Amino acid sequence: MLKDMANYKNTKRNDKCPCDSGKIFKKCCMNDYREAKKKGGSRGVIITTFSPVPPLDKIFQKEFTEFYIKLMIYSNQYQNGSDYVTIDDKNQNMQSFIESQREYFYTNANDIIDKFILEEKPNKNDLEILEALKNAKLDHYFLLSHSANNAVIMAKDENIYNIQALNSPFTEVFNLNKRYLGLHTVLIPYKNRYITDGIYGGFDLDKDMYEYFDKLPYKNPSIIYNQKNKIINIPLVINFVVHCQSTKFETMEDIILRNIPETFTKSFIELFKNEFSYKVQLISSFLRSTDLSEDLNCKEGDQTFSYIIGGTPTTNFELNGDNDVIPYSVLKNYYTQKPLSQSASRSVYDNIKKNEKTLFKDLMSQASFYTMIGMIHIDSDKEDDLIEFLKGFEKPKQKTTVKIGIDNLFEDLSKESNFDISGEFIGLGINLDKIYYDINKYRDDF
C-alpha cells in the first residue's frame, strides 16, 4: 500500500513519479496506486507505527545518551590501548565519532563491556544499559514507516520491530519523500522496548524491495515491541441498546455517533486497566450493531476489521498524540456508518416512517442496538486471563458500575439535545460473534 495516497492523486501518466525514482508515473507506481485505490487504500493502511509500550521518559533518554558517549570513548581507548582518545579527523563531531567507533565496539562488545564493568564499577542503571548493549545488533535494516515518536523497521531475517525515538523525533530524522529507506543502525532492547542509538547510515533499495514492502500491510505481519513479551492486539466490542422518541431517532443516531464525550470514554477505559494490559483504546462512538455484524463478520469484512484495529490507533496516535480515545473523525477513514435508510436495521427505519403518520407519533418510541469498538494490547500468554477478566462484567456488581456511567452519559446527552435518550449496557466480548449473542440474550430476557 502506498504510504501517502495524496502524493499520487493528481499525477498524470507521463508525469515524474512522486516516489522520486526518476521514472515517469506509468512506468513506476501507477499500477500500484490504482490497485491501492481499488482496495480502499488510505494513509492508515501502512505498517502501524503505533506502540502500546509507553516511550522512555526524558531522564532515561538523557541517562542513556550520556552513558553511551562515555562507553564509546572507553571503546576507543580499549581499541588503542591508551588513556587518550584517537580520532582520524580534528573536525570530527561526537555523532561522527560514535558512528566510526561503534563498528569496533559491537564486534567486541562482550570483552569491552566486561572490562568496563571491572574497571569503572558502574551503578545499577548503567549496568542495565550495558546488558542491553550486549544484546544489541548493529546491522542493515529497512525503514517501513515512521511517525514522530515511533518507527517500524524490518531486519534482514524479516522480523519487524517497532522502535522508539531516543532524542530527535523521527519526523525530523527521516525527513525524506520516500516510501522506504535502507538504514545502517543498531537495534537495542532497552527497558522493555526497542530503541536505536539515534545514528543512521543509509543505503539504496532496488525496485523489487519497494514492491515487496508495498505488499506487507496486506499480510498483517507480527510486529515485535519488546524483547520479553509478544504483545498482541485483541479487538473489544461493548454492546448497548438505546431508546428514544421515534421522531428523534435519526437525530439521536447522529449525536451518539459523533458526540460521545471523551470523559465518558476515558472512564470506560479505566474499567479495563489491569496488570496484564499494556494499553486499552476505545472508539468514542456507538456504531449500529447489525451493520457491524453484517459488514465485518464475514470473509470480505475481515480485512476491513483488521484495518480498523490496526489503522485507527496509528492515525489517532499521529493526529491526537498519546490519546486512548479515538473519535469518529478518525474511525471514518476505515469504516463509515451507513444512513439508517440503507442499514441492515431497515425495519427500524420503516417503523420510524410508519410512526410519523400516526396521531400519537410524539408518544411512540424506538430502540436499536449499538456497539463501541475497542482494542486491548496484551502479552500473548495472557489471553486466557483477559477472557476471565471480561467475564466479570457479566456479574451484577460490575454491571451496576457500568450502568451508573451509562445513565450519566445519556442524562447529559438528553439535556444537550432537549429530548430523552436512554441507554443500557448489555455485554462485551473480544469478537464480533458476541454482538449476536448479546442482542439475542437481551431479546430473550426482554
Image (cartoon, rainbow, N blue to C red):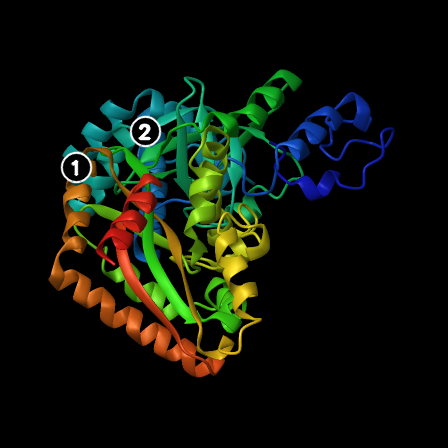
In the rendered view, does 266 fall on the left or right side of 156? left
Q: Name the N-terminal-most of marks 1 and 2.
A: 2
Q: Dot 1 surroundings within 10 Å: few (below 14), some, or many (20 or more)?
A: few
Residue most extreme to the front: 359
Q: Is residue 57 visible?
A: no
Alpha carbon separation for disc pair 1 and 2: 32 Å
Disc number lying in front (1 or 2): 1
Which residue, given by chain and number where applicable, does mark 2 sit on? 136
Q: Nearer the viewer, residue 275 or 135?
A: 275
Residue most extreme to the right: 14
Q: Mark 2: which secondary structure?
A: loop
Q: Position of residue 221 (x, y in %)?
A: 42, 27
Q: Is residue 335 visible?
A: yes
Above or below, 252 against 310 in this view is below
Tally of marks: 2
Which residue, given by chain and number where applicable, does mark 1 sit on? 384
For the N terminus, give its image quadrant: top right
Picture residue at 47% right of the left edge, 83% below the top: 418
Q: Mark 1: which secondary structure?
A: helix
Picture residue at 44% right of the left edge, 60% below the top: 285
Above or below, 281 against 84 in this view is below
Q: Nearer the viewer, residue 328 or 337?
A: 337
